Amino acid sequence: MIIPIDLILLLFVVILAITVIRLKDLLSAVILLGAYSFLMALIWVELQSVDVGFTEAAVGAGATTAFLIAAIARTTRWEKE
Amino acid sequence: MNEKERDVIVETVSRVMIPFIQLYALYVIIHGSGGPGGGFQGGVVFASSFILYVIAFNLAGGRKRFPESANTLFSSLGLYIYGGIGLLAILFTRGMAQYLNYGFIPFTSHFEENRALGMDFVEMGIGITVMAIIASIFFDLAQREEPVGEKEEK
Protein backbone atom coordinates (compact mmCIF):
# COMPACT_ATOMS: atom_id res chain seq x y z
CA MET A 1 0.00 0.00 0.00
CA ILE A 2 1.66 3.19 -1.27
CA ILE A 3 0.01 6.37 -0.04
CA PRO A 4 0.84 8.75 -2.97
CA ILE A 5 -0.52 6.28 -5.54
CA ASP A 6 -3.71 5.92 -3.47
CA LEU A 7 -4.13 9.69 -3.29
CA ILE A 8 -3.60 10.16 -7.03
CA LEU A 9 -6.08 7.38 -7.87
CA LEU A 10 -8.65 8.77 -5.44
CA LEU A 11 -8.22 12.25 -6.96
CA PHE A 12 -8.91 10.84 -10.43
CA VAL A 13 -11.94 8.95 -9.10
CA VAL A 14 -13.41 12.13 -7.59
CA ILE A 15 -12.80 14.09 -10.80
CA LEU A 16 -14.41 11.35 -12.89
CA ALA A 17 -17.43 11.08 -10.59
CA ILE A 18 -18.07 14.85 -10.72
CA THR A 19 -17.65 14.84 -14.51
CA VAL A 20 -20.07 11.91 -14.93
CA ILE A 21 -22.90 13.57 -13.03
CA ARG A 22 -22.41 16.91 -14.84
CA LEU A 23 -22.40 15.54 -18.40
CA LYS A 24 -25.42 15.93 -20.67
CA ASP A 25 -24.19 13.34 -23.18
CA LEU A 26 -25.25 10.04 -21.62
CA LEU A 27 -23.00 7.89 -23.82
CA SER A 28 -19.93 9.84 -22.68
CA ALA A 29 -21.14 9.52 -19.11
CA VAL A 30 -21.38 5.74 -19.45
CA ILE A 31 -17.88 5.48 -20.92
CA LEU A 32 -16.48 7.67 -18.13
CA LEU A 33 -18.34 5.47 -15.63
CA GLY A 34 -16.42 2.51 -17.06
CA ALA A 35 -13.16 4.40 -16.53
CA TYR A 36 -14.32 5.19 -12.98
CA SER A 37 -14.92 1.49 -12.36
CA PHE A 38 -11.46 0.58 -13.64
CA LEU A 39 -9.85 3.16 -11.33
CA MET A 40 -11.92 1.82 -8.43
CA ALA A 41 -10.66 -1.69 -9.29
CA LEU A 42 -7.10 -0.36 -9.20
CA ILE A 43 -7.78 1.17 -5.78
CA TRP A 44 -9.20 -2.11 -4.45
CA VAL A 45 -6.13 -4.01 -5.68
CA GLU A 46 -3.90 -1.32 -4.20
CA LEU A 47 -5.68 -1.80 -0.85
CA GLN A 48 -4.77 -5.55 -0.99
CA SER A 49 -8.31 -6.66 -1.74
CA VAL A 50 -7.81 -8.47 -5.04
CA ASP A 51 -11.15 -10.29 -4.93
CA VAL A 52 -13.20 -7.11 -4.68
CA GLY A 53 -11.06 -5.49 -7.36
CA PHE A 54 -11.67 -8.41 -9.69
CA THR A 55 -15.41 -8.18 -9.11
CA GLU A 56 -15.37 -4.43 -9.72
CA ALA A 57 -13.45 -4.86 -12.99
CA ALA A 58 -15.71 -7.66 -14.23
CA VAL A 59 -19.09 -6.26 -13.17
CA GLY A 60 -18.59 -2.50 -12.98
CA ALA A 61 -16.43 -1.96 -16.03
CA GLY A 62 -17.61 -4.88 -18.15
CA ALA A 63 -21.21 -5.86 -17.60
CA THR A 64 -22.67 -2.58 -16.31
CA THR A 65 -21.17 -0.57 -19.19
CA ALA A 66 -22.65 -3.01 -21.71
CA PHE A 67 -26.05 -2.85 -19.97
CA LEU A 68 -26.12 0.93 -19.91
CA ILE A 69 -25.02 1.21 -23.56
CA ALA A 70 -27.77 -1.24 -24.53
CA ALA A 71 -30.27 0.86 -22.58
CA ILE A 72 -29.05 4.05 -24.33
CA ALA A 73 -29.35 2.32 -27.72
CA ARG A 74 -33.04 1.73 -26.99
CA THR A 75 -33.82 5.16 -25.51
CA THR A 76 -32.11 8.49 -26.20
CA ARG A 77 -28.51 9.68 -26.07
CA TRP A 78 -28.95 13.26 -24.82
CA GLU A 79 -30.31 14.27 -21.47
CA LYS A 80 -33.31 16.59 -21.69
CA GLU A 81 -33.19 20.02 -20.07
CA MET B 1 -27.84 -3.47 -33.61
CA ASN B 2 -29.11 -5.58 -36.50
CA GLU B 3 -28.88 -3.31 -39.51
CA LYS B 4 -25.22 -2.25 -39.33
CA GLU B 5 -22.57 -3.18 -41.84
CA ARG B 6 -20.23 -6.03 -41.04
CA ASP B 7 -16.61 -5.37 -40.04
CA VAL B 8 -14.20 -8.19 -40.85
CA ILE B 9 -11.57 -7.13 -38.28
CA VAL B 10 -14.03 -6.98 -35.39
CA GLU B 11 -15.61 -10.27 -36.40
CA THR B 12 -12.28 -12.10 -36.75
CA VAL B 13 -10.85 -10.77 -33.49
CA SER B 14 -14.04 -11.69 -31.65
CA ARG B 15 -14.05 -15.15 -33.21
CA VAL B 16 -10.52 -15.70 -31.88
CA MET B 17 -11.09 -14.04 -28.49
CA ILE B 18 -14.38 -15.61 -27.41
CA PRO B 19 -13.05 -19.17 -26.72
CA PHE B 20 -10.19 -17.75 -24.66
CA ILE B 21 -12.56 -15.55 -22.66
CA GLN B 22 -14.72 -18.58 -21.92
CA LEU B 23 -11.67 -20.68 -20.98
CA TYR B 24 -10.51 -17.90 -18.65
CA ALA B 25 -13.97 -17.79 -17.08
CA LEU B 26 -13.82 -21.52 -16.38
CA TYR B 27 -10.33 -21.06 -14.89
CA VAL B 28 -11.64 -18.31 -12.61
CA ILE B 29 -14.55 -20.49 -11.47
CA ILE B 30 -12.39 -23.55 -10.72
CA HIS B 31 -9.62 -21.60 -8.96
CA GLY B 32 -12.07 -19.48 -6.97
CA SER B 33 -11.61 -21.35 -3.71
CA GLY B 34 -7.83 -20.90 -3.62
CA GLY B 35 -7.28 -17.43 -5.01
CA PRO B 36 -9.08 -14.36 -6.27
CA GLY B 37 -12.16 -15.07 -8.30
CA GLY B 38 -15.02 -17.46 -7.83
CA GLY B 39 -18.38 -18.40 -9.21
CA PHE B 40 -19.80 -14.90 -9.51
CA GLN B 41 -16.80 -13.36 -11.26
CA GLY B 42 -16.35 -16.33 -13.56
CA GLY B 43 -20.04 -16.24 -14.46
CA VAL B 44 -19.84 -12.54 -15.30
CA VAL B 45 -16.74 -13.11 -17.46
CA PHE B 46 -18.47 -15.98 -19.23
CA ALA B 47 -21.57 -13.85 -19.88
CA SER B 48 -19.40 -11.04 -21.24
CA SER B 49 -18.28 -13.42 -23.99
CA PHE B 50 -21.92 -13.59 -25.13
CA ILE B 51 -22.11 -9.81 -24.91
CA LEU B 52 -18.99 -9.58 -27.12
CA TYR B 53 -20.60 -11.95 -29.62
CA VAL B 54 -23.75 -9.83 -29.79
CA ILE B 55 -21.73 -6.61 -30.21
CA ALA B 56 -19.47 -8.07 -32.91
CA PHE B 57 -22.09 -10.00 -34.88
CA ASN B 58 -25.78 -9.40 -34.30
CA LEU B 59 -28.47 -10.00 -31.75
CA ALA B 60 -30.33 -12.70 -33.69
CA GLY B 61 -27.16 -14.79 -34.11
CA GLY B 62 -26.42 -14.48 -30.41
CA ARG B 63 -29.95 -15.49 -29.56
CA LYS B 64 -29.57 -18.51 -31.84
CA ARG B 65 -26.36 -19.57 -30.07
CA PHE B 66 -27.85 -19.04 -26.61
CA PRO B 67 -31.63 -19.40 -26.93
CA GLU B 68 -34.29 -18.44 -24.43
CA SER B 69 -34.92 -22.07 -23.43
CA ALA B 70 -31.22 -22.61 -22.61
CA ASN B 71 -31.35 -19.40 -20.61
CA THR B 72 -34.20 -20.68 -18.47
CA LEU B 73 -32.58 -24.11 -18.13
CA PHE B 74 -29.18 -22.80 -16.99
CA SER B 75 -30.51 -20.15 -14.64
CA SER B 76 -32.44 -22.79 -12.70
CA LEU B 77 -29.83 -25.56 -13.10
CA GLY B 78 -27.22 -23.59 -11.16
CA LEU B 79 -29.66 -22.96 -8.32
CA TYR B 80 -30.55 -26.65 -8.19
CA ILE B 81 -26.83 -27.59 -8.04
CA TYR B 82 -26.26 -25.10 -5.21
CA GLY B 83 -29.28 -26.21 -3.20
CA GLY B 84 -28.76 -29.89 -3.98
CA ILE B 85 -25.17 -29.90 -2.71
CA GLY B 86 -26.37 -28.20 0.45
CA LEU B 87 -29.14 -30.74 0.94
CA LEU B 88 -26.79 -33.67 0.27
CA ALA B 89 -24.80 -32.68 3.34
CA ILE B 90 -27.94 -33.03 5.45
CA LEU B 91 -29.13 -36.21 3.73
CA PHE B 92 -25.85 -38.16 4.01
CA THR B 93 -25.54 -37.50 7.74
CA ARG B 94 -29.29 -37.78 8.45
CA GLY B 95 -29.51 -34.29 9.86
CA MET B 96 -26.26 -34.25 11.81
CA ALA B 97 -24.41 -31.77 9.61
CA GLN B 98 -25.56 -28.27 8.81
CA TYR B 99 -26.78 -27.11 5.42
CA LEU B 100 -23.86 -26.62 2.97
CA ASN B 101 -21.37 -28.33 5.29
CA TYR B 102 -19.58 -29.99 2.39
CA GLY B 103 -17.12 -32.06 4.39
CA PHE B 104 -19.72 -34.68 5.26
CA ILE B 105 -20.63 -35.47 1.64
CA PRO B 106 -18.81 -38.75 0.83
CA PHE B 107 -17.23 -37.87 -2.54
CA THR B 108 -13.94 -39.38 -1.32
CA SER B 109 -12.74 -40.75 2.00
CA HIS B 110 -11.04 -37.56 3.24
CA PHE B 111 -12.93 -34.78 4.98
CA GLU B 112 -10.82 -31.93 3.54
CA GLU B 113 -10.99 -33.34 0.03
CA ASN B 114 -14.77 -33.60 0.32
CA ARG B 115 -14.90 -29.98 1.41
CA ALA B 116 -12.79 -28.80 -1.52
CA LEU B 117 -14.89 -30.79 -4.01
CA GLY B 118 -18.16 -29.54 -2.54
CA MET B 119 -16.91 -25.97 -2.69
CA ASP B 120 -15.99 -26.45 -6.36
CA PHE B 121 -19.45 -27.82 -7.17
CA VAL B 122 -21.15 -24.92 -5.41
CA GLU B 123 -18.94 -22.44 -7.31
CA MET B 124 -19.96 -24.14 -10.56
CA GLY B 125 -23.62 -23.75 -9.65
CA ILE B 126 -23.16 -20.06 -8.86
CA GLY B 127 -21.23 -19.56 -12.10
CA ILE B 128 -23.91 -21.21 -14.26
CA THR B 129 -26.73 -19.15 -12.73
CA VAL B 130 -24.85 -15.85 -12.90
CA MET B 131 -23.84 -16.51 -16.52
CA ALA B 132 -27.43 -17.20 -17.55
CA ILE B 133 -28.88 -14.23 -15.64
CA ILE B 134 -26.33 -11.66 -16.87
CA ALA B 135 -26.76 -12.84 -20.47
CA SER B 136 -30.53 -12.72 -20.02
CA ILE B 137 -30.44 -9.14 -18.71
CA PHE B 138 -28.27 -8.04 -21.65
CA PHE B 139 -30.46 -9.78 -24.24
CA ASP B 140 -33.61 -8.26 -22.74
CA LEU B 141 -32.07 -4.78 -22.73
CA ALA B 142 -30.68 -5.00 -26.27
CA GLN B 143 -33.73 -6.58 -27.87
CA ARG B 144 -35.95 -4.27 -29.86
CA GLU B 145 -39.38 -5.69 -29.22
CA GLU B 146 -42.04 -5.55 -31.89
CA PRO B 147 -44.46 -2.66 -31.29
CA VAL B 148 -47.52 -4.79 -30.58
CA GLY B 149 -49.40 -2.61 -28.12
CA GLU B 150 -48.97 0.73 -29.93
CA LYS B 151 -51.52 0.05 -32.62
CA GLU B 152 -54.22 -0.67 -30.08
CA GLU B 153 -53.54 2.56 -28.22
CA LYS B 154 -53.90 4.65 -31.36
Image (tube, coloured by chain):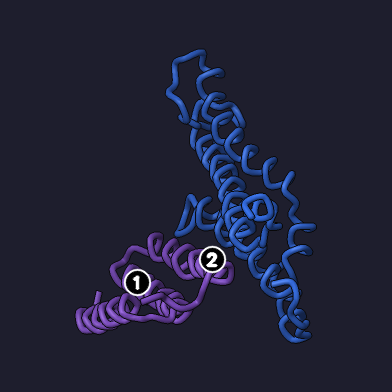
Chain colours: A purple, B blue
The residue sitting at 69% across, 40% down in the picture is B73
Which residue is under mark 1? A40
Q: Position of residue B28 (x, y in %)?
A: 55, 59
Q: Position of residue A67 (x, y in %)?
A: 53, 64
The residue sitting at 74% across, 86% down in the picture is B9
**Left or right: residue A72 compared with residue B146:** left
Q: Amino acid at mark 1?
A: Met
Q: Position of residue B56 (x, y in %)?
A: 70, 75
Q: Quadrant of residue B144?
A: bottom right
First in residue order: circle 2 vs circle 1: 1
The residue sitting at 36% across, 77% down in the picture is A81
Task: Determine whether the residue tagged by mark 1 lies in a helix, strand or loop.
Answer: helix
Which of the chains bears the disc numbered 2?
Answer: A
Which of the chains bears the disc numbered 1?
Answer: A
Q: Is residue B154 visible?
A: yes
Q: Position of residue B52 (x, y in %)?
A: 65, 70
Nearer the observer, A39 or B109:
A39
> Badges 2 and 1: C-beta atoms under 8 Å apart?
no
Task: Determine whether the residue tagged by mark 2 lies in a helix, strand or loop.
Answer: helix
Q: Amino acid at mark 2?
A: Ala
Which residue is under mark 2? A71
Viewport quadrant of the C terminus of chain B: bottom right
**In the depicted structure, whether residue A44 falls above or below residue A35:** above
